[in-house]
Amino acid sequence: MTASVPPPAPAEALLRLLDDPTPQVREALLDELRRQGDDGLAFLRATLDGSDAALAAHARRFLRELGGEDTVQMFLEFIRSFHYEMETGLIMLERTVFPALNPADPHGFLDAAAARCRQLLLTPSPAREKCLVLNRVLFHEYGFRGEAENYHDPRNSFLHQVIHRRRGIPLTLSVIYILVALRCGIELEPIGLPGRFLVACNLGDEPFYIDAYERGAFRTEADLRAYFRQLEIPFDPAMLMPAPAGEVVARCCRNLVNQYTAARDHVKAKLFAEFVHEFDLAYRRHAEPT
């Protein structure tokens, strides 16, 4: 067996080399995995979940040597904990695909956006005025937009990818809006409607809803009733109940199943389907009487 790993190395070739004890081969394989970056780490994590326990042990050893964390296992532990926090969960979710992501990067952006909002906020001021400030900063100064041309691109479901590209789908744009508002002392709520995701403001006498996909357009309950009439979906006031943090992260996983399936990336589609299944199991365990 040669000591070199020809690029590009398909997964089958890497698997054949994983258990080779020859020091030269192991070093060459490490070099190839380093060259592949996130793809190399993703290959090792996928091997951890395979049926071959011996290969999984070798993959774990390579992962440690590369300084990589088993971000898939970390996210699974988060799901099973049933202690959900939206920002943490979405960053952990993203690191299952982009393990090199430094959580300080999205945290830092959200902190900076909130600091800019606080410069413009007047205290006291009505909730609508505060949300107009958030609209100005996020959609005009930073330029966030709803992604229309490539709506089903999986990057639209990853928090830091949306921050980097300034494009996203309703769920991720709504989450960014809520997290920036929270840093400003404004408590807004995620609303997971059928086929749409909005931000609810219940701070004044009359609740209103913010459509982050439409650059922060304000909606009333009457607007939402009309929207559902157009879709021929019966309106239920329970639809406007805030979505728990775990359900927001689980819905993001369900979106990614569909997005990766459309992209014919069946490995990642299967991974996120497993996450959805784990969320279902966690909710079922929590609902069982003790």
Image (cartoon, grey):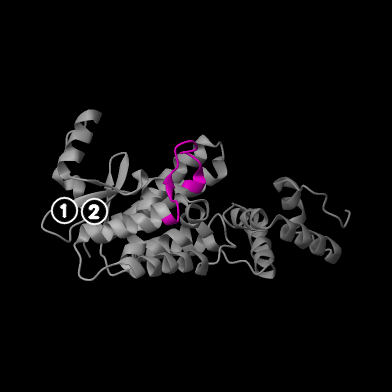
Tell me which corner region of the image, top left, top right, bottom left or bottom right, holds residue 56: bottom right
- Residue 273 percent location from the top left of the image: 45, 46
Q: Determine whether 262 is above or below 182 in the image.
A: above
Pick whichever, 24 or 136, lies toward us.
136
2 left or right of 282 in image: right
Pick whichever, 141 or 208, lies toward us.
141
- Residue 220 percent location from the top left of the image: 18, 45
Residue 207 image label: 1
Q: Name the amino acid type tagged 2.
A: Ala
Q: Residue 154 lies in magenta, yes or no?
A: yes
Residue tagged 2: 200
- Residue 66 percent location from the top left of the image: 68, 67
Does the rendering let one see residue 199?
Answer: yes
Residue sitting at x 39%, y 51%: 173
- Residue 254 percent location from the top left of the image: 40, 45
Tell me which segment is drawn in magenta. 141-156
Q: Quadrant of the C terminus?
A: bottom left
Tell me which corner region of the image, top left, top right, bottom left or bottom right, holds residue 223: top left
Please report contact status of discs 1 and 2: CB closer than 8 Å, yes or no. yes
Label whose residue precedes the other's in the sequence (1 or 2): 2
